[in-house]
Image (tube, rainbow, N blue to C red):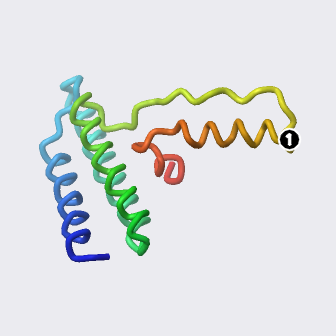
Amino acid sequence: MTSVTRQEVLGLYRRIFRIAKKWQSASGQTEDTIKEKQYIINEAKTLFQKNKDLTDPELIKQCIEECKARVEIGLHYHIPYPRPIHLPPLGLVPQRSRAFQNQEKLRKFSKPAYLRSYDEVS
């Protein structure tokens, strides 16, 4: 990891913890705010720990972009949790057929950048 990339990752990490420190839930209730702050902190720690050993620059860049997207979406909608997505449904084809493989490929490509690591953690 280059020093510029390292600084960018550490800056994102600090930014997330600053956001968590100042976070107010949309409902305004204290217990919701506490739960959401804890979620932000736990999610950041988990994902950064999981990705700490990455060495591929392209993969690191994807993780940085995902992090930035999740932060901006969370700040915009005032919801720290990932937004739901609607993937194309699976058809009624046998699992070993070529059509099933094509459907799986479509589902993979239709997943937005901000949710790539969400399924791996939860």
Quadrant of residue 100 in the image?
top right
Give the image location of residue 93, x and y in percent.
84, 31
Q: Residue at x 43, y 65 (%)?
A: 50
**Residue 8 vs residue 46: left or right?**
left
Q: Residue at x 72, y 30 (%)?
A: 90
Q: Residue at x 30, y 38 (%)?
A: 80
Question: For numbered disc 1, what is the local secondary structure?
Answer: loop
Give the image location of residue 49, x and y in percent.
38, 67
Q: Which residue appears farthest toward the top when viewing the image?
A: 27
Which of 65 and 73 lies nearest the eye of the viewer? 65
Which of 59 and 73 lies nearest the eye of the viewer? 59
Report the quarter where the N terminus lies. Answer: bottom left
Give the image location of residue 89, x and y in percent.
67, 26
Give the image location of residue 25, x and y in percent.
22, 31
Q: Is residue 61 above or below residue 2?
A: above
Q: Is residue 95 above or below residue 51?
A: above
Task: Give, as a three-letter code, the residue at label 1.
Answer: Ser
Mark 1 crowdedness (10 Å alpha carbons): few <14, some 14-19, many ≥20: few
Which of 66 and 99 lies nearest the eye of the viewer? 99
**Residue 64 vs residue 84: left or right?**
left
Question: Label 1 belongs to which residue?
Answer: 97
